[in-house]
Structures are given as C-alpha cells and as structure tokens.
Image (tube, coloured by chain):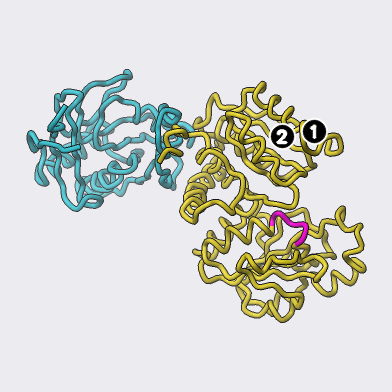
Amino acid sequence: MKHLLDLQNLAPDEINTILDNAVPMKQILNREIKKVPTLRGKTVVTLFYEPSTRTKTSFELAAKYLSADTVSISAPSSSVVKGESLIDTAHTIKAAGADVVVLRHPAAGAPYLISRRVDASVINAGDGMHEHPSQALLDIFTIKEIKGSIAGLKVVIVGDILHSRVARSNVWGLSKLGAEVHLVGPATLLPPGIENLGVQVSSDLDAVLPGADVIYVLRLQLERQNQGLLPSLQEYASLYGINSRRVELAQDDVLIMHPGPLNRGVEISNEVAEHPNAVINQQVTNGVAVRMALLYLLSVGDVSNETAN
Amino acid sequence: MELRTKAEILDQVGIRRALTRIAHEIIERNKGVTNVALIGIRRRGVPLSIRLAERIKQIEGIEVPVGFLDITLYRDDLTRLDYHPHIYRTEVNFSVTDKIIVLVDDVIYTGRTVRAAMDAIMDLGRPKAIQLAALIDRGHRELPIRADYIGKNVPTSKKEIISLRIKEIDGEDSVLIQEPLRE
C-alpha cells in the first residue's frame, strides 16, 4: 500500500490487514512508555486546509508514538481551494522532505492530485464531502473490537448523509466487510442515488432502529446548514436526534457511536452521550492505534516492490 | 528454494534434555528463581519459554512468570524489507522492573533480534538484569552479544539454514541443518 486515499478502492483483505495491525499498536498506548522506535528518521507532515483538532492531533500522536518527526502546516481555509494552489502545495511537501503527508482539504479529490505529484505516501484525512477513510477505519476497528466481527451486523447511520464524508467512507468499509448498512436522515440531507451503493435508505428513524447493532450518529454540521435544507434544529432533534427512547428500540447491546465533536441536544441527547453503550471516547483512543497501523503500513517495506505484485 | 538436509542436530529427546539442562543452569546461576521471569521471543521462543517454566517448576516447585514479546516494531531493518512483517501481540502481564529477565529464543545468529528484544524490554520497565537462553547458537554474530544459556553450539556457514521445528507450532520437535541444493 502506497497511499490511503479512500475505502472505495480498498479490498476487504487490505482493510483487515490495517485492523489487525492496529491491535498491537493499541497495546503500546496502554504502556508506561508509549513509544517504539519503528519510524525513526521518517517525517510525517500534516497539512490541513480545514480546521480540525482531533484528527490532526490523533495523526500527530500516532506519528510521535512511532518515533517519526512531525511537521504541521495549517493553511487558512479561505485562501486556497483548488487548481494551481494545490500544485504549489505539492511543491511545499516535496521541499519539506516528507515521507508521509496527511492531507485535509475542502476539495474532493485533492489527495489524489497530490499523490501523483509527490514521492511521499499520502493519507486522505478528509476531502470535501468525499471520504474520510481513517475515521471509518477507526469506527470499524471499534465495532470489531467489541462485537468480534462486522459481517451480518445491522448498522444504522443517522444524520446529514449529504455532507458527510464520514458516512461515505463507513458505507464503503462496512459494506465490504459484510455489514447491513442503513442510512437515515431527512430527505433533503440524503444524496440522490446513494441507494446504489447497496445500502438501505430511509427517512423514518423509528422504523429502522429495531434490531440495530450499531447506531452511528453523525454530527450535524451546523456550518453547512445555511441552505434551507432543515426547517429548524428543534425539528431535526425531535425527528432524528438519538435519545434514550430511541436507544431502547435497538438491540440491548447496541453500540452508540459518534465521530465528534458532539452537538449535545441536537443529534444526540446528553443521557445517550453518557450511556454505558456509548463508545465515543473509545473511538478517540482507537483512532490513534489505527493511525499508527496506517503509518506503519505505509512507511515500512519497499513499496515499489509491493505495487509490482 | 529446494533444500538438502545435511544433518539432524537435535531430535525430540535432544531438545528435551537441552531444555532440562538450561532450566538447571538458570536455577543455579540465579541461586533459585524467586526473582526470575522468562520472556519468549515470538514466535518459536514462546513455546520454548513455556517448556522451560514447566521444567523449572518440576525442579524447584516454583512457577516463574512467563511473557511473550514481539520485536517487529524494534527491528533495525524495517525500511529495507520488501514486505510487512506481521506484528504479533506482546503479552508481558507482570512488571519487569527489578526482575531478572531470561530472554528465550530458538536460534541466536546475528544478535540483531536480541538487541531489538532488549530495547523492547527496556521500554516496559527497568529489569535488574537480562539474560539470554537460546536453543541453538549458530555463530556469525554482528553485535557484541552472547547467550548465557545455550542448548547446543552449531558451527555453520552463512549459506546453511537452521530449520528448527517446535511441536506447538510445527507439529514436531527437531533441529535440522540444511543447505540450498543449487547456488
């Protein structure tokens, strides 16, 4: 594996390899000395064209725990979007001598463009409304850690599907591993044609929840809700907010997940956020382990040899 | 690669006797085993460390702690490999600090695995001492490292291969010395 650009083009075997390697990485996080020398002398550049705290911190911690050097470049989200500026970005990365570039960009496809212009491995940390593969991998790792396997699980992803790269990556990853994925949200926030990805689509949350093994609550991206797609936050909360009553509808051992940060009282109620089945903090911890596995797999070994196979 | 077997160095009985002797040596050298713990290096050091612990229990009546170590993340050749080595779990469920740690491996060769294992143990704590037990010492050290307990010294040439098979992993106990049929 040279880059991680999406889950759409990853084989189930490749996804499982990443998940398997995250298990021993997680052990390192529980040690007194949370550091191994594996990536000594390697440089990981995080390049974020959109604000992010947890994804960026998670990648930087993962790199540091593996003894890589990290450089963080944040670009103001307003100044550059696409076209020539991305090519300039590639030049910056080359000049920095990076081995791995972690890129977040508002334009879908930006990581692909960059990956063709740099020698470094590129990890997509979110591109527009397209994909956020490392988030989905940590979500799938968390489900697998608790449930044992993914195949046959009923996973309900609820919220703003239209704007969600997290949802799209999870759809690809979970489907490839055999989960039954349901997407639920107001009709205005369900992209047309999404059912073609082999998922069930509905706007009636209460009808979908019975039998759910996982409720994945998407963050309502308030910054994207100025286009009149929602009547009001109150109405959204009453129809699609996950509260204790709705959790009761699902399986007793349902997992409640959220990529963070939470809008408490909007997509998730306070009680549910603190529910014993909510694994939101575990997702954050697992994020570091999964990203360590990714950095290890992308940085170790002669990649040119591997792509030849 | 086709291999020709040149000789069987140890059979099942030979391995058993070697481990029994090593167990006695560990007890003698450390004047008992009250502060001793064994750590097997994955993969074939693991069953060997379990067997040594059993042998020590038979002799001294004391169960020494046993842990297992995966050294992949500490290897010095990671960037030179053309594959991803599988990372196994490290299971050391006791504090190594102030203990006498006996590392257990199947074959000691260049010494690089032992170097990596020592670094990995140091990251788990500060042992009182680290000792090394190996079933086979085949020479050709590239680092200033030697084993404290050796099952059998086997002078080899670099092109020869030591094929060590352990029942728990390979279905039988044997140590063969082999070489490629063609150059």
Tag 2, which chain?
A
B57 inside magenta stretch: no
Q: Amino acid at mark 1?
A: Ala
Q: Share a chain, discs 2 and 1? A: yes
Q: Which residue is mark 1?
A: A75
Query: What x and y, as percent, mark residue B37?
Result: 35, 40
Chain B's shade in the image? cyan
* Image mark 1: chain: A
Q: Amino acid at mark 2?
A: Leu
Residue at image location 54% in from the left, 47% down from the top: A26
The percent position of residue A49, horizontal first and vertical second, equals: 77, 38
Q: Is the residue marked by circle 1 packed among few (<14), some (14-19), or many (20+) residues within 10 Å?
A: some
Q: CA distance from mark 2 to mark 1?
A: 7 Å
Task: Please tell me which residue lies in front, B43 or A186.
Answer: A186
The image quadrant of residue A51 is top right
- Secondary structure of the residue carrying tag 2 is strand
Chain that is yellow in the image: A
Question: Relative to residue B179, is residue B89 depicted above or below?
Answer: below
**Which residue lies at the image location 11% right of the left edge and 46% below the top edge?**
B12
Classify residue A85 as left or right of residue B99.
right
Q: Is residue B49 left or right of residue A111?
A: left
Q: Are marks 2 and 1 in contact (CB under 8 Å)?
A: yes
Mark 2 or mark 1: whose residue is earlier in sequence: 2
Q: Is residue A62 above or below residue A67?
A: below
Pointer 2 residue: A47
- Judge from the rendering whether residue A116 lies leftward or rightward of residue B140; answer left or right: right
Quarter of the image with the N terminus of chain B in it:
top left
Q: Image quarter for residue A154?
A: bottom right
> Which residues fall within the magenta stretch?
A162-166
